[in-house]
Amino acid sequence: MVHIPSLFDVGSVTHAGRVRARNEDSCLVRTDIGLWAVADGMGGHEAGDLASNIVVQSLDTIGAPDSAADLLAQCEARLFSANQQILALSHARQGAIVGTTTAVLLIRDGHYACIWAGDSRVYLINRGGIKQVSHDHSELEELIAGGALSREEVQGWPNSVITRAVGVVADPEFEVVTGPAEPEDVFVICSDGLTRHVQDDEIQQYAASRLAQAACEDMLALALERGGLDNVTIVIARLLVPRSSEPTRTPLDREQRP
């Protein structure tokens, strides 16, 4: 299969918020290979910013992929490598818990893959509305999935403990979801510092109606206005309609054709 590069409108922001002194979020924009990522260092633990940076720096070493499958395989290999590096950091700090959530979006050859661990999220916005592609790896989400609580009952609850992360165990569990990626699809990757303050329908409104960078900046401003209680990181990637490779013909050109 011949690879036809996609065109994207991309934006990104990351901010410490109004409460925390340090930004433990990191993000990566590698539009050249069709990869975008958000990592949220585990708050309250040591070196969360180092953990999220290790993930981003590891992913940034990915070379030009041969195919969508190769891109996913390289991504998974880098995430497992980052996990080992973070575990080594924890060992060097006398066993202190060090970890980070990670959400990665890959787009190539008309398909996307979302790979994640933790509660950083990937959304897809299209003509059908907004859909959360990932689901949170958290105790609260497990209670909802098990039927112990309804989603309405947990509105306004404090942040739940995450159940998966990079750098916490020797054999990390990542979840992968794939699907078609079509022109005008909008993907939003974000840390929970955004979703703590901004609802899904608001994310859809901002991301669908603005250029990617403006949407990121406006949603950040909204999260800060509502308290900015955590670090906030947002990456938006919108697939653009490909330009036709056929030269434009004038009416005169068409009249002269045999």
Image (tube, rainbow, N blue to C red):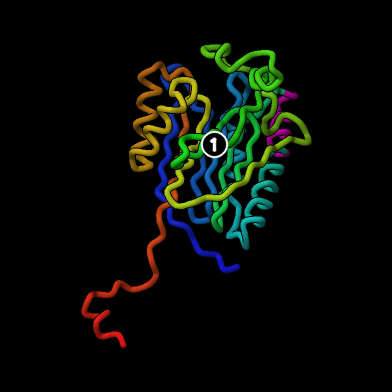
Q: Position of residue 256 (x, y in %)?
A: 25, 85
Image: 40 above or below 45: below
Q: What residue span does the magenta drawing correspond to?
A: 84-95
- Name the magenta segment's main secondary structure: helix
Q: Position of residue 199 (x, y in %)?
A: 45, 24
Q: Position of residue 152 (x, y in %)?
A: 55, 14
Q: Nearer the viewer, residue 239 or 100?
A: 239
Q: Residue at x 39, y 28 (%)?
A: 220
Name the image quarter holding residue 247.
bottom left
Q: Residue at x 47, y 57 (%)?
A: 6
Q: Farthest residue to the right: give it.
A: 170
Q: Nearer the viewer, residue 181 or 128?
A: 128
Q: Is residue 161 visible?
A: no
**Mark 1 = which residue?**
122
Check the picture and name the quadrant holding the N terminus.
bottom right
- Residue 228 shown left or right of residue 144 in the figure: left
Q: Farthest residue to the left: give it.
A: 252
Check the picture and name the quadrant holding the C terminus.
bottom left
Amino acid under disc 1:
Val
The crowd level at tag 1 (other Cα within 10 Å; few <14, some 14-19, many 20+) is: many
Q: Secondary structure at mark 1?
A: strand
